[in-house]
Amino acid sequence: MDPLMSGLIGLAVLVVLLFLGVHIGVALGLVGIVGMATMVGLDAAMSSAADTIYYKVASFDLITIPLFILMGYLASAGGISSNVFKALNLWVGRFKSGIGVSTVMSCTAFGAVTGSSLVTASVFSSICAPEMRKFGYDKKIAYGICASGGMIGMLIPPSILMVIYGVLAGESIGKLLIAGVTPGILLMVLFSLAIVLMGIWRPSLIKSKEAPRLYSWREKIFGLLNIWQVWFVALVIFGGIFGGIFNPTEAAAVASTFLVLILLFSKFRQSWRLFVPAFRDTASTSAMIFLVMSGAAVFSHFLVLTGVANSVAEIVLEMNLSNLALVCVLAIVYGVLGCVLDSISMLCITIPIFGPIVEAAGLDPIWYAVVVVMAIESGLITPPVGLNVYGAYAVAEKDVSLEDIFMGVMPFFLMVWVSIALLIFFPVVSTWLPELMLGK
């Protein structure tokens, strides 16, 4: 059989397996091995698959992933998330729509100690959404804010998705992590603006029954000092990588060790009871990610053998699209894929296909990566997948339905695409910080 035809059949079979509910990692690996077996024989295919998985998963850079995941679970177990909300709410909570804005700011701050959007969305849905409803927020908006705010955690360092992108695409993980800082802040500002505007134009959605009291400067400053763990972790990860003191893996190791010690000393009697689920969940989540990446490595090797990736690149390049138009098209493709695939699966499947296109077009790899991650993030709040929405729903109050949360995230979904448009038309938003890095 013609190699190109084998590749196209493999892609079709992969889609069928995904619709049948086969795990994405298993589906990718199975299609890759069977596809290679039809071309080079079963023994050669199995040997090639084993070598490919080893050399992809045995990467030193991938140690960063379980460390970043562990940081999130430890921060949640240590009560850092609730302290962050209390501290920031002292500053903006008393203003109209202030509790919603402080929730978004809290999600951003908590994102500095966890690289998982799902963890951030779940944690703040349990902490902040009931508080917002107490002060008159509509339940849809309250949980929509928390589910959407969790997205910011996947942009600013530590970001698991940036690490995976860097490993799969062969880009500098340090630069990718630093590049996500400004877009993450941009998204925080746009989400906050959306909440303020809703408070003005749709007061029925955000009506304050009673305003929190005015806090003194002493209380506000003490609140910020009370979350010194967040500032320390942010300094280690951002400052260490930006200043060339640590590489991403070293920064993750230092920060996670710090959080272990904090939890050990602050909650000594409870520490082991808290450590067990944190380490168990870290192992479970990491295993899932590595399974997907292993299957993707095999599938990618299969696509290389068939020449599908190069054929797709040739077709797209023959369309003579400008770089701006090309990025817009690819961003929309990722937005559509987000309706049916999770973030990691999207990267694992598409990078081998779109990689040659991006390279041939000469796009700035850091700029393109941030646009892609932002577009992928939109899938976290779109049906039917919408992992952040499901995470918020899992901890929501009994009178809140899944449909309520999907409706509540829609204003923020629009803001995500406004931020994507700004990133596309103003690449400097994502590239200026990496260019200033001392550690390249």
Image: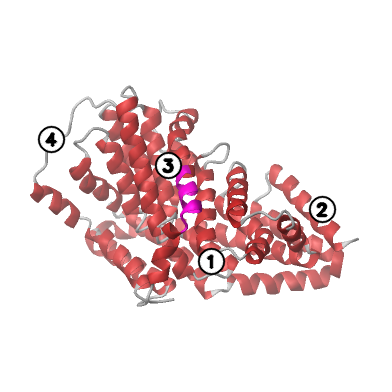
Q: Secondary structure at mark 2?
A: helix
Q: Could you tell me the amino acid type at mark 4?
A: Arg
> Which residue is situated farthest in the right direction here?
1
Name the main secondary structure of what is drawn in magenta: helix
Residue that label 3 marks: 148
Question: Which badge, 1 or 3, comes first in the chain's sequence?
Answer: 3
Q: Are marks 1 and 4 in contact (CB under 8 Å)?
A: no
Q: Could you tell me the amino acid type at mark 1?
A: Gly
Question: Which badge, 1 or 4, comes first in the chain's sequence?
Answer: 1
How far apart are the two marked residues, 2 and 4, measured between alpha carbons? 64 Å
Rendered image: mark on residue 9? 2
Instruction: Specify start and end residues of the magenta stretch as a single range.
Output: 418-427
User: Residue 301 vs residue 248: left or right?
Assistant: right
Q: Could you tell me the amino acid type at mark 3?
A: Ser
Question: Which badge, 1 or 2, comes first in the chain's sequence?
Answer: 2
Q: Are marks 3 and 4 in contact (CB under 8 Å)?
A: no
Q: Please indicate, yes or no, whether residue 283 appears anywhere in the rendered image.
A: no
Indicate whether 198 appears above or below 433. above
Q: Residues within 10 Å of mark 3 (few under 14, many from 20)?
A: many
Residue that label 4 marks: 213
Q: Secondary structure at mark 3?
A: helix
Q: Secondary structure at mark 4?
A: loop
The N terminus sits in image quarter: bottom right
Residue that label 1 marks: 166
How far apart are the two marked residues, 1 and 2, measured between alpha carbons? 29 Å
